[in-house]
Image: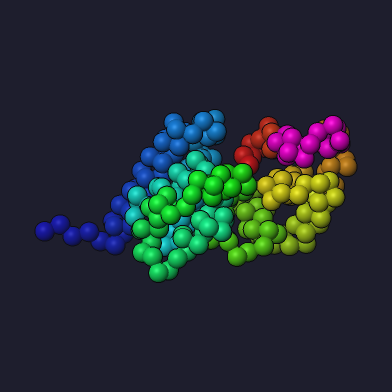
Amino acid sequence: MLTLHPRQINILDQHQEQQFRLTLRRRIQQEYPAYASVSPTILTRLIGFGLARARSYGFTWQSSLGQFVYLMAAVAPNFDLHPAIHSILANADLPAEKRIASLTERLPIGVWTEAANTASTMGWFLDKDSFKLDRHTRIGLALPNALQGIGTTLDEQLQRSIRRAETLVFLTEDAQFVFAACWLHYGENFELQAPWAKALLTSDFTPQIQTALLRVRLALDAGIWL
C-alpha cells in the first residue's frame, strides 16, 4: 500500500494549485479581451489574490473558486462589494458551495449592471472580504499587493495622497487607488514636479481619462499593471 508523507502531500497540493491557476489564467485570457494583453506572470499573481478572497468567503471547491475568479474578470474585479451580491456570498445560513449558483438564481440583471458600472481594478489586489471596510482602508490593503516592496505602514502617506486626489477631483475609489499608487511610486507631489504629470493633470482631460493615462504611465515606466 502506497503511503504519502506530509511533505509529499504538500508538494502534490502545490502542484495541483499551480495547475488550477494556469487553467484559470488561460481561460480568462481567451474569453475576456481586457486581460488578453496582461502578462501571464501578472495575471497569475492577480488570480492568486482572487482565489484568496474567494476562500475568505468559505469556498473550497475548485468549481466555486474558479467561478468567483471568472466573475471578477467578466463583471468587475470588485463585484463582491455590491451589497446585494455580498449579502449572498457572506450568508452563513447558505452552504458556501451553493452561494455562487444562488447569485445567478436570485439576483436581477440590474444588480450585475450596477456592479459593472462601479468596477475597479483595485479589486484584483484585495485578498480578503473587505465589504465592511471604508474606502481608505480598502485602498491601504490593496496598495502593498499592487506595489510590491512598499511595505504596509502607509496610513499617513495614504491619507495625504487621497486628500490630494480629492482636490484634483479624483472622487471614485478606482481613481484614488491609481493616484495613490503614483504618489507612492513617483514620490510625494509628483503631480507638481514631473513635467508629464503637470501636462496630464489639467482641465483638458476628465478625471476618468487622467486615471487611464496614469495607469498607462505606471505600466510604461515600471511595468506595474493596475
Vertical relation: 5 (above or below) 170: below
The secondary structure that dominates the magenta segment is helix
Residue 46 image point, x, y percent? 52, 45
Which residue occupies the foreground of this view, 209 or 52?
A: 209
Q: What number of labels is visible? A: 0
- Does residue 105 appear left or right of residue 218 in this picture? left
Q: Residue at x 15, y 57 (%)?
A: 2
- Residue farthest to the bottom, as pictured: 93
- Does residue 149 appear left or right of residue 107 in this picture? right
209 within the magenta span = yes
Q: Is residue 177 visible?
A: no
Q: Residue at x 45, y 65 (%)?
A: 91
Task: Please identify the quarter of the rendering in which residue 202 is found.
Answer: top right
183 within the magenta span = no
- Does residue 151 appear left or right of residue 107 in this picture? right
- Residue farthest to the left, as pictured: 1
Q: Is residue 225 visible?
A: yes
Q: Which residues are magenta?
A: 198-213
Vertical relation: 156 (above or below) 31: below
Q: Residue at x 47, y 52 (%)?
A: 107
Which residue occupies the foreground of this view, 102 or 77?
A: 102
Residue 16 image point, x, y percent? 33, 48
Residue 76 image point, x, y percent? 55, 45
Q: Residue at x 38, y 40 (%)?
A: 23
Q: Quadrant of the C terminus?
A: top right
